[in-house]
Structure formats: structure tokens, C-alpha cells
Amino acid sequence: MKVRNNDALRGENLQYLFTILFILGFMAFFVFIVLMVLSMRKQNRIPIRYVLLTSACFAIASIGMYGMLALPSNPPQSSGTDQTKKHDSGTATTEEFKNKFNAAVGKYRLNGLSITRLNMKDSSEQGTGAFEYVFNDELRLVGTLNSDQKVQEVRLYGTGDVSEPTGGIFLTAIATLILTTNKDYTYNDAQDVIQDIGILDRDVSQSEFDGATVRNGFEYRFSIQEDISTFEIAIVE
């Protein structure tokens, strides 16, 4: 529920007041201008009261216009508890997620990574859910949904030889996931994230590697435990 604060109400009231002053002042100014012209034609002179009233109406209209321009056009409408939630650009339904992923695959010609159909899991009692996609015997994608059925977290699991440096299709899938969560990122940006995590600039062929970085409200983490490599993207609360 939206709670309108006093500043918002005060701003709206002033906006209405200045608008009324401008409209009434301008209309009255126009009327007295016409009367002054008619008086000139009929009596060949302008009554002093018309001059004073026209000047007053012009001043009122000017005050109204100045007030309308000075006030913000969109005053605050709600309290801080109703601000737009972060990460709206990052959260997506499973269909939107699949489309963004495949769009990145197509744009950068990342062969062998297209998602055909996500395998949806049964929802839990809390209304959340999960999905999975198997690329091959050594690489699979797992995701979780929040109560709004939006993608909350995604993980890549690699079961290849961890004694070798991370590369090949697993590294490409990591870059694709980064591109999926950041629509403005380029492939170079994705490589920068991977570099920050430490996958490229240090030996990750160790049994307990764990590196992470935070970008634009997302945490990117890569870890190796018990011969399983995991890359995870999660929304930072």
C-alpha cells in the first residue's frame, strides 16, 4: 500500500493553487485588454481602473506561471517504504531468462549452449520453485525462483577434471550467464567479471578455490569443492 507523505500533499496543493492563479489571471487579463481596446475606440481614452486591473491580472497570471515552473512536475508520491525495488532489470521469468540467455548465445556465436526447454521442478510450500537444464554430461544449469516466480539465483555445475584450468564450454557458459543478467554488458565486460573473481589470473585447479565479486547488485561466485566446479549468480539483498 502506498502512503502519501505531507510533502507530497503540500506540493500537489501548491501546484493546483498556482495553476488556478495562472488560468484566472490570464483570462481576466485578456478580458480587460479587450475592454481597454473597446474603450479606446468608443471614448478615445482608457479609464485608469482598466489599466490598474489589467496590471493586477497580469501580475496574478505571472505569479501562477512562476509557481508552476518552480515546483517539481512530479512531487514525491510515497514514503521510502514504497520505493522501486532494486534489480528489476535483472530479475526475469524463466521464459525471459531463457530468451536472454539464447540471445547472448546467438549474438556472440557461442555454439553448443542454446537452451531448448528448461526442466521445471515442483514448487515448494512457500510458493518458490526451481528449474534445471543439462548441456552435457559435465555441465548443467540449475536455477531457483522467488515467490513471484522470478529467477532469484542460477548456478552452473561442472564435473570435469578440476586439475586442469577452467576453460572450454564451462568458461563460455559462465560468460553467457553474466551477459544474461546484465543487458548492457558486452563480452569484454563479462571477461572483466571473470577476471575479478580470479578464474583467469590465478591457479583455480585446487580443491577448495572460492572467489567472488559484486557488480550492479549481483554477486558472482566461483568455487571448487570435492571435484565439482560451481559458478553462481545471486541477487544481493
Image: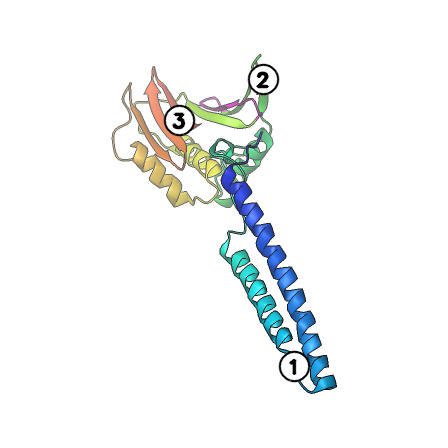
* Residue displayed at 38% across by 30% down: 220
In the rendered image, which quarter is residue 195 located in? top left
In the rendered image, which quarter is residue 205 located in? top left
Q: Is residue 117 left or right of residue 214?
A: right
Q: Which residue is mark 2?
A: 127
Q: Residue furthest top?
A: 125
Q: Earlier in the sequence, mark 3 or mark 2?
A: 2
* Residue displayed at 46% across by 39% down: 182
On the question of residue 106 being in view, the answer is no
Spot occupied by residue 44 in the image (x, y as percentages of width and height): 69, 87
Q: Which mark is residue 233?
A: none
Q: Earlier in the sequence, mark 3 or mark 1?
A: 1
Q: Which residue is mark 1?
A: 46
Above or below: residue 226 compared with residue 230: above
* Residue displayed at 61% across by 75% down: 51
Residue 145 painted magenta: yes
Q: Amino acid at mark 3?
A: Phe
Q: Earlier in the sequence, mark 1 or mark 2?
A: 1
The boundaries of the magenta stretch are 136-149
Q: Residue furthest left?
A: 202
Q: Which residue is mark 3?
A: 231
In the rendered image, which quarter is residue 194 located in? top left
* SS at circle 3: strand
Nearer mark to the viewer, of 3 and 2: 2
177 vs 226, nearest the viewer:
177
The alpha-carbon separation of the residues under discs 1 and 2 comes to: 79 Å
* SS at circle 2: loop
Residue 217 painted magenta: no
Q: Is residue 14 left or right of residue 179?
A: right
